[in-house]
Image (tube, rainbow, N blue to C red):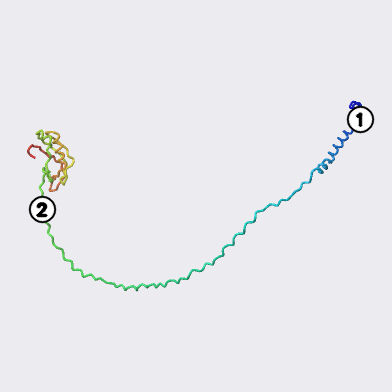
Amino acid sequence: MNYAQQQRNPVRQLAILAVVLVFQALLIWALVSGLGHSIVDLVKPPIETKIIEEHKPPPPPPPPPPPPTMAQPPPPYIPPPDIQIQQPPPPKAIQTVTHTPPPTPPTPGPIATHPAPPGPAVPDHDVGERPLNGGQPEYPEEMQDQGREGSVNVTCDVDTTGKTSNCQVTSTQGGSAFARSAMDFVSTRRYTPRVHNGVPVESRHTFHITYRLGSE
């Protein structure tokens, strides 16, 4: 039978189609009912499990035994030194010395004293013109070179010891160089103070100083 004849036989085709459908239906049923799992279990070989023992490290060696405790021998006995305490000597007896003062000599009677005769009375006088500590006023050099002469009046306060203070030039002749020289001189001198009723007193006095060539 050739291919053309097979195509013209519908009964055969239907039979083949029916067989295929039945096979598919059986296959679906087998899968749903678990037959497929049984087949897979039959095909799949059993899994063998092996227990592998873990190699544990060897235990650490035991710690060494502690050293034996050595009993410490007691310290040697040292006897205390024999110290002899010297007793202090007994205190000496204190001798009390009584001092008897000598008898007081009799007090002599009052001795009559005669007052010294008063000295001569100091006459009253004014301030001295000559200084007690000496010296002369300095002649100005420029005035000597010019051949000039002059005079100056200087008024000062003089205390009871003869020292001067608060000096000022009241008049001058010949130039200011003479005035400066006179002020320097009188301010550093000490004079005899004024005496009134026999007693030195403070006073204000005017000193007259003259400058003459060839009179130094």
Identify the secondary structure beneath mark 1.
helix
Is label 2 in a helix, a strand or a loop? loop
- Residue at 10 percent across and 53 percent down: it is 119
> What kind of residue is marked 2?
Gly
Q: First in sequence: mark 1 or mark 2?
A: 1
Residue 158 vs residue 58, the one in the foreground: 58
Which residue is at 85% across, 39% downward? 30
Quadrant of the image occupied by residue 4: top right
**Badges 1 and 2: C-beta atoms under 8 Å apart?**
no
**Quadrant housing residue 62:** bottom right
Q: Residues within 10 Å of mark 2 (few under 14, many from 20)?
A: few
Provide the residue designation for mark 2: 119
Amino acid at pointer 1: Arg
Image location (x, y in percent) of residue 90: 34, 74
Where residue 102 appears, as percent x and y from the top left, is: 21, 70
Answer above or below: position of 5 versus 78.
Answer: above
Q: Is residue 65 left or right of residue 34?
A: left
Which of 107 and 102 lies nearest the eye of the viewer? 102
Would you call the spot at circle 1 few (<14 residues within 10 Å), some (14-19), or many (20 or more)? few
Q: Which residue is mark 1?
A: 12
Q: CA distance from mark 1 to mark 2?
A: 201 Å
State the residue in front, 112 or 148: 148
Instruction: Give the label, 1 or 2, closer to the camera.
Output: 1
Quarter where residue 142 is shown: top left
Q: Please give the name of the residue rendered at 91% of the width and 30% of the height, measured from the top-left corner.
A: 12
Question: Could you tell me which quadrant the N terminus lies in?
Answer: top right
Left or right side of 93 for 38:
right
Where is the C terminus found, in terms of image quarters?
Answer: top left
Q: Is residue 89 above or below residue 149?
A: below
Q: Position of residue 186 (x, y in %)?
A: 15, 41
Name, please, the residue furthest toward the left. 214
Of 122 and 187, nearer the camera is: 187
